[in-house]
Image (cartoon, rainbow, N blue to C red):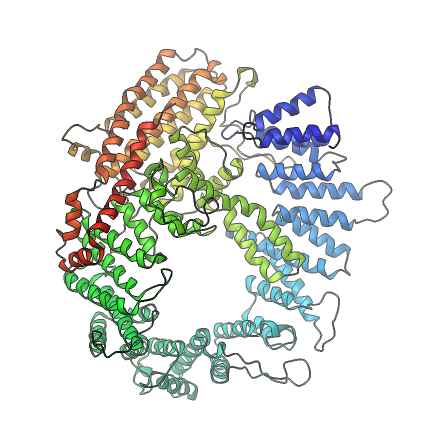
Amino acid sequence: MGTPFERRNQQVWDTLNAPGGGAKQALQLITRRLKKGEKGDHLTAMRAFILAQMPSAGLNPQTSPLTEALTLCNALAFRNPPPKESETIHLLEMTYIYLGKKAEIGKLHEHLYKARIATPGRTKPIDEAGLKEWYNGCLKACDWTGMQRAAMALQRGFPNNRAYYFWAITACFILVVACDDDQRSSVGLFGTLASRMISKAASEIPEGKELGPIRSIRTAAELQLFYDILSFTKTEDAELAKHLESKTTGFSSRLGSDSFWEFWWMLVETKLRLQEFKDVNDHCHSVLSTGSVTVKDGTDGTGLEQPKVSRVWKDDWKVWAAYVASAVKIGAEDPEDPLFNRAAMLLVDELKDGERSSRNALLAALEFASLCRPHSNLNCKEDVSALPTACLTFFRKQGGTSSCYDDLRPYVNQLNADEQKELLGNMVGHCKSKDITSSELSTKDLTNAVRERVTLLKFRFWIEIDDQERLPVTEGLNDFVRECLAVYDVSLKVDIGLLVTDMRIGDELLLLVAKALMCKYAACRMQDPLPVKVAIIILEHLLTKSKHNFTALLLLVRLYSIIGAPSCATIEYQRLSIKQIQNDSLSHHVLTRLSTLLPFSVSSAAKLLHPTDMADVGMHVPHNPTDSLEMYEISLRLYKNANRTNPEMISLAFKNSAYGQIKDMVLFEKKVSSSISACQFEIERRRVQRFRGVAVTEGSTSAGALWDRALEATTSDNRTFDLFGEDGWHTGCDMGPRVGIQWVQAFLLTENIVATLVAQSQAPAADAPKGISSPASSSSGSKANGGIAEKEHVPHSQRLRRIIDGEGANGFTKVERQVLDIICVMGDIQVESEAGSKSSGKVKLLLPEISSKFQALRGSFQPPSKGNLDGASSVVGEMSQLSLEESQDRTQWYNLHQAYMILEVCKYILILCEYLEKSPAVKALKPQIPKSQITDIRNLIGSSWKSVVQMAKELAKDAVLVTDTDIDAVLSCKGLGMASVAEFVKGVIGRGKVESYMDKIARGRSSTWAAVGGVKVG
């Protein structure tokens, strides 16, 4: 049962973790025990831990529970003597992590160590166990500075322990790797120190098989660390090459044998930078010819007795590329050099008809022709093939492979327009020499012939239709689509018997048809998006046969978003099976603005799912893939888990002396801890909660750490995020808005301003401080130990105004800028109400400004009237960053976006009214704010609320409305002028499937926005 003290503690933890309990109830239990006179370090640490978890975002430092938690932690952690119980120390560590003060953990353990060695009666000047606790504590908190200091103390105090020496080297290296680029110069000294220490260890490696000195390199992992440090600290290439050729540290040494080829390739890269092209050419030719590297003087026991042979490296692309690059450099200096002639003859033999050559060898011939192309003295030689000729030969030999298009495209791109057309004509002639309709072809020959046609059609589409430097060409589009579908019919003969998880040859053809339809849509933006709907139906048909074609799934996500069916887009997004860190890099496809596009889930979404796609429900895939709130909860889980698992993995790498893995782990931790996507997810999650009337929670990460990191770390970051991605299937136009860092910062500041108003309106009058100082003079950060001055605090409203008036202003829609203007005034009201003058004069002047700005916002929003929705086009204005596609017919999307922004600002203003009525700071103003003025502001919202909801409902009905006429238009491809597409849709897909696909589109959108009627403000 435990002691009474343990039972009382368990009661607190149970209350804290109970579904109906929380931090507030647990804090009451702690307070009750303190009032009864109970004392103890553990009880104080528990109180600090609970205070750190209480909602406090936006509160002033004087009233925030976080401030009290930090004060309690610092008083307990840095007192003399410090606490000794391991459970108390662990609680202090956890509290600092919740507060976003991981650096304090290292200072805590340093203080514990100093107090430990200062204990009366000790005879030893150092304590190994205490230093290891300091080291491990800093490692768990990712406090690299503290870890480096502890590691250096360990290696100095215990010189006979070689592990401590390499810990110190690695800790110095990590300190350089983990720092930001602008801090690299200030910590460069640690990189130099790590380089010197590891170089000393390398210099003491014996030439024989004996162990050598205690601090010498003895394992392959330590040798890998040696080269990682030299490469990262930008050691001179000449010195690096000397080490790589050494008998003790080189690629052919005893320790380097486990990483023989990796070190050999590092030597080749180094010699290329040193322009020692003849050595590179000899090395690579030896490997390509025999699969081995000649090892000099390998009979004395210091090197390899036999050259190391590798079948993989004998045909590795990197070896071919280095060989070709060195040969061309040599030939540019002397065209008659035998090394150049040897390479030219070898590559000509690879291109000869009838010879079976590997893919990499043929690519090397292409690269050789490409590099020789700018040198006129090399092009005239008989052994040098012209680039167009090499491209055609490569197509003839590799056209039947799925990789041919990706391999050949970079080289075809180097040809001029006339050469590209001539090459395309030669490809057509080669393909027509094989009749794919002939029954005499074997299955293997038919498969190769069909693949050649697919590759040809890809090049034809790229060269003749989808030129990225201009709008897509629609001339000849019908013939192109007709040929794609004709080849698709033939491909069905060779795709028989494949599993639904296999990629089919015909998939590429249907993707080309979908791309052609998108070109038709891009060229005629004012027309109905019928081509997009037809493309969706074709891709859905593709996925019935090849369900894991991720290119088709990703394209479907984009197309559903374009036609205004975000719920369908989220369902396809979940079918991609995106897990963990992939969400961080692919979130721009769906997750960046779901609070505006899909704030409410579709209850019937489960009927639209594919059951076999739901193996990871609850872990990586939401139960309802249209539930944006659940999607954000799952996405944020990665960052919470990474904060726990990353230090554990780094600690395990140290324990196992796996030094070669530590750099990648540290870089991963750095990226995850400073992810902009995490900040976007948190913003969107809170906005969705506000729309649904759910209490806004702190989320899966420490609020203070998240907001501060986002606001400070992204100040100089100019990256942008394309809602539809930078790669993939281009249509000759930018189909998505770009969400910049300014957008993230603006809505982070908005959340802080709103959270401040909520916290102040909920603060009891008795707890109000006697003299509330102006936020303009208070600190936004915590004091550092040693009395270092705090940073000057800039009010959130002022920082927000700088963003929307600065260079990033074009990152916001017109309605977003109007809303942010209102938020700025709300922030000004909060600042003025807490000013030291205690005068309500400025606040009274700012309140009418709130009313006028909201009336201007509402004035541009016209509720629908029967039979007349055209008047809404007058409110489009500047909307370069709004629409899901860049057509000029964006009225409905703009109105939806505007309606939901008005819903959001209505909640903001109601929060302001609550603040004006209940905040102790406002009540202290003289004279007080008239209640009639607050009532007038409330009435503004009441008069617009019904029109906002009505507009959203009307647009929900008309946004994606599928009728029998639409289905007939798809079946006949009316307006497209593509008879072959209509025939394919009718014959292959059929009317039944078309109706089900169109019904899916209709349900996916209208049922989502119909949920608007269930929203309540306030």
Query: Where is residue 887 shown, x and y percent of the image?
Result: 21, 46
Q: Quadrant of the N terminus?
A: top right
Horizontally, residue 236 falls left or right of residue 342, namely: right
Above or below for 489 versus 155: below
- Say if residue 949 shows up in the picture: yes
Number of callouts: 0
Q: Is residue 951 left or right of residue 67?
A: left
Residue toward you, 469 or 5? 5
Q: Residue at x 65, y 65 (%)?
A: 222
- Where residue 544 appears, as percent x and y from the top left, is 31, 56
Q: Nearer the viewer, residue 639 or 179?
A: 639
Q: Is residue 415 above or below residue 386?
A: above
In the rendered image, which quarter is residue 516 located in? Answer: bottom left
**978, above or below 704, in the image:** below
Residue shown at the point (58%, 46%) measured from the top left: 644
Q: Is residue 807 visible?
A: no
Q: Percent from the top left, x then y, of residue 986?
A: 17, 55
In terms of depth relative to the viewer, which is nearer, 389 or 428? 428
Quarter in which the C terminus is drawn: top left
Of residues 358 and 659, the one drawn nearer to the viewer in this rendering: 358
Residue 639 lies left or right of residue 968; in this view the side is: right
The answer to which quarter of the image holds residue 33 is top right
Quarter holding residue 504: bottom left
Percent of width and height locating residue 503: 35, 63
